[in-house]
Amino acid sequence: MNEKIALLGFVEIISSLSCGIVILFLTYKILKVYGQKRLGLDHSNLAYNILIAGVLLSVGFIVSGVIQPILDSYRLLSSSDITKTELIFNFLAYGGLYILIAYLSSLFIVFLGMYIYSSMTSLSELKELKDNNVGVAIVLVAIIFTLSLITSNGVVLLVESFIPYPDLPMRIR
């Protein structure tokens, strides 16, 4: 058994699971507060639940793309001459930065999707959600998820620009 690969697999499982739980919990709480305080909605509203499910799926999809850059950073950092304490600190710092970038990007995409929908129609999507209009919720989720699919590669590329690749020597002609 290759211990380095096994350790890397263990690190991926733990970091992905913990990141996923925190991201989903935080997003759910934000949506719950937004729905209850601003819109006066509760969990008996099917349209609101569909919106929550779509937003959680979209956010999870975008944030899941940063797992590979986090692992690439870990591989680069673990092959350098730093102590285990520095490795853990640097891994957490880079991982936290990558997740924060992806999470903020995903929230921006969600709100952009809502804005696009309200711009395209004369409907007030918030009123329609309050009235439990499932059709509006489904279209809104489709717009949000489509934007997530289209932009996820760009978010991952943005995150990859922060990977601490070693400097390559200049080529002399």
Image (cartoon, rainbow, N blue to C red):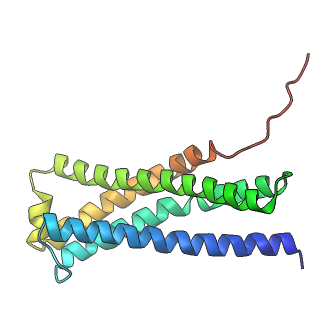
Q: Quadrant of residue 142?
A: bottom left
Q: Is residue 49 left or right of residue 81?
A: left
Q: Position of residue 72 (x, y in %)?
A: 72, 55
- Determine the residue located farthest toward the bottom in the rendered image: 44
Residue drawn where x is 61% and y is 54% of the image:
93
Q: Position of residue 156 (x, y in %)?
A: 56, 51
Q: Position of residue 13 (x, y in %)?
A: 65, 75
Residue drawn where x is 24% and y is 48% of the image:
116
Residue drawn where x is 38% and y is 57% of the image:
146
Frontmost residue, 116 versus 22: 22
- Could you tell me which quadrant the C terminus lies in? top right
**Exactly how many numbered labels are in the figure?**
0
Q: Position of residue 25 (x, y in %)?
A: 40, 73
Q: Is residue 143 left or right of residue 131?
A: right
Frontmost residue, 49 versus 119: 49
Residue drawn where x is 37% and y is 55% of the image:
107
Q: Quadrant of residue 26?
A: bottom left
- Could you tell me which quadrant the N terminus lies in? bottom right
Q: Quadrant of residue 95?
A: bottom right
